[in-house]
Image (cartoon, rainbow, N blue to C red):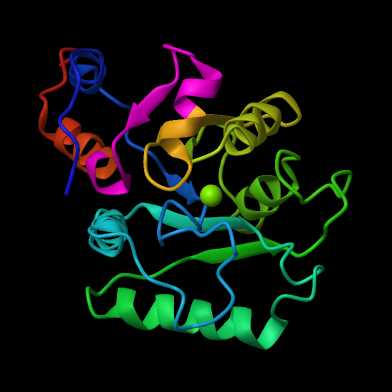
Amino acid sequence: MREKSNAHQDAQEKQPLPRPDLVILDRDGVINQDSSAYIKSRDEWIPIPGSLEAMAQLHHAGIKIGIATNQRGIALGLYDHQALEEMHEKMRILLAEHQGEIDMIAFCTADDPHHPDRKPNPGMLLSIIEALALPKESVIYFVGDKSSDVEAAQRATKESDYQVTPILVRTGNGLKSEKKMNDSSLLTYNDLASFVDALLLNRTIPSTEE
Ligand SMILES: [Mg+2]
């Protein structure tokens, strides 16, 4: 069940969001339920209600989808590459039921906080953007549930010629992150589905420039 929107969020969602060329998603806590015990198998990978439908909507709208996920559980020996592949296969199969597709999945198995790909470092975001060969003026969002996701987006912007706008969702660790960061300028939505709704509804607002 979705939470009731607060007044602040309502105001925020009325502002038009530029239509993106690419939406990069964190995985755990954004697409699927997260667990402090890690998501270790295909069976533990459970989508958050509405997330796959939202991804399919993005795909149908011609917006590219990337995933950037820290998976240090592999470095910790909690699961292996094959288990990770199986989770991603499950995700792709369930998404295909909605005729959705993912353009690229980047994951970082390192436990080392200095690894360039481990969020909050921006390596995975920049790899996805470069692999998809997007022009510099592209509109790109990164949707996450942790402060490390927000920081990765900010650093991707600082360390490249691209603008990557952070979006926080309240699923997973999002509510805790929202309280911890206490940043009223951060675009925050209850979940991925409500972000995508806001994004795609804005397309129907007539342009005032014409
Ligand atoms: Mg997460």
Residue at 65% of width from left, 28% of height from top?
A: 157
Above or below: residue 184 compared with residue 23? above
Q: Quadrant of the C terminus?
A: top left
Name the spot of residue 166 as percent of width and height, x first: 50, 31
Locate residue 132: give its quadrant: bottom right
The magenta-colored residue range is 178-194
- Tell me if 10 is positioned left or right of 34 in this view: left
Residue 123 visible in the displayed image: yes
Residue at 18% of width from left, 43% of height from top?
A: 2
Residue at 44% of width from left, 83% of height from top?
A: 43
Q: Return the residue nearer the eye: 88 or 137.
A: 88
Above or below: residue 208 compared with residue 153? above
Magenta stretch: includes residue 14? no
- Tell me if 149 is positioned left or right of 192 in this view: right
Locate residue 206: give its quadrant: top left
Q: Return the residue nearer the eye: 156 or 60.
A: 156
Name the spot of residue 67 as percent of width and height, x first: 53, 58
Residue 166 visible in the displayed image: no
Residue at 57% of width from left, 31% of height from top?
A: 150
